[in-house]
């Protein structure tokens, strides 16, 4: 999945999650620092797994690191395993500074990484070994193969234009309503 697709899918999952939480009675985050930490952390986590590909958006931002890293780590392997965000969640959960911004940042990055993996699991390639160390050779995907698409394909662009952009706009509208910005 392209960086654009990843960002838009991740934001729709995030906004949708916030809306559901709000519907269940949780209050909306209002502190600007909390919102900023969540936004930056989730988007960073969303882009991070593709650091294993030096042509990716994040790979180009950290070119030197990505070139060296991708020489050792095959694309869509280690950085895409579920294990990585799970380790981050566990680390944040047991952190000394509970309810701190740094804890929130780690949760946000881990959440973003899972959003990234969901995106790649919508593509034809899926993620091989996603549940590593379990099933290391199994390709894991979410949709049946006839509904999956190739990265950069026309179908992915249609998915972005006709699904992700409208749903993001709708969720933003609902959130602005929930925040009382629009009536
Ligand atoms: Zn990826």
Image (cartoon, grey):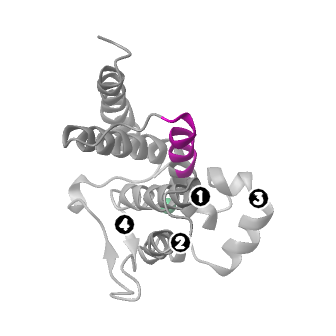
Identity of the residue drawn at 30% across and 66% down: 141
User: What is the magenta range?
Assistant: 31-41
Q: Residues within 10 Å of mark 3 (few under 14, many from 20)?
A: some
Which residue sits furthest right?
64
The first of marks 4 and 2 along the sequence is: 2
Numbered mark located on residue 63 in the image: 3
Residue that numbered label 2 is attached to: 95
Q: Is residue 39 magenta-colored?
A: yes
- The residue furthest top is 183
Q: Nearer the viewer, mark 3 or mark 1?
A: 1
Q: Are marks 4 and 2 in contact (CB under 8 Å)?
A: no
SS under mark 4: loop
Between tags 2 and 3, which lies in front?
2
Percent coordinates x, y for residue 124 in the rendering: 35, 61
Q: Nearer the viewer, mark 4 or mark 2?
A: 2
| Tag shown at residue 29 | none
Mark 4 C-beta to ligand 1 under 8 Å: no
Circles 3 and 1 in contact, beta carbons < 8 Å? no
Name the dominant secondary structure of the magenta segment: helix
Question: Per the image, is 36 magenta?
Answer: yes
**Which numbered dot is residue 102?**
1
Query: Could you give the CA–CA distance between mark 1 and mark 4, rounded to whole angstroms?
Result: 31 Å
**Are circles 2 and 3 on residues that touch, CB within 8 Å?**
no
Q: Which residue is mark 4?
A: 126
Whether residue 144 sits left or right of residue 78 in the image: it is left
Instruction: Indicate the quadrant where residue 156 lies.
Output: top left
Spatial separation of the CA atoms under disc 3 and disc 4: 25 Å
Crowd class of label 1 (few under 14; some 14 to 19; many from 20; radius 10 Å): some
Sequence-wise first label, 3 or 1: 3
Relative image position of residue 104 (x, y in whole percent): 51, 55
What is the x, y in percent for residue 28? 36, 36
Under circle 3, the secondary element is: helix
């Amino acid at each position: 999945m392209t960086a654009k697709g990843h960002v838009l899918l991740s934001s729709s999952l995030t906004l949708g999650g916030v809306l559901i939480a709000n519907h269940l009675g949780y209050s909306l985050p209002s502190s600007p620092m909390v919102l900023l930490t969540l936004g930056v952390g989730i988007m960073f986590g969303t882009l991070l797994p593709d650091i294993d590909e030096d042509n990716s958006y994040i790979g180009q931002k950290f070119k030197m690191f990505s070139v060296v890293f991708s020489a050792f780590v095959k694309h869509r392997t280690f950085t895409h395993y579920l294990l990585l965000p799970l380790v981050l969640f566990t680390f944040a959960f047991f952190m000394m500074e509970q309810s701190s911004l740094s804890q929130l940042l780690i949760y946000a990055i881990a959440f973003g990484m899972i959003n990234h993996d969901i995106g790649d699991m919508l593509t034809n390639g899926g993620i091989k070994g996603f549940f590593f160390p379990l099933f290391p050779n199994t390709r894991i995907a979410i949709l049946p193969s006839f509904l999956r698409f190739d990265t950069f394909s026309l179908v992915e662009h249609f998915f972005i234009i006709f699904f992700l952009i409208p749903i993001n706009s709708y969720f933003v509208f609902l959130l602005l309503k929930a925040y009382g910005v629009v009536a």
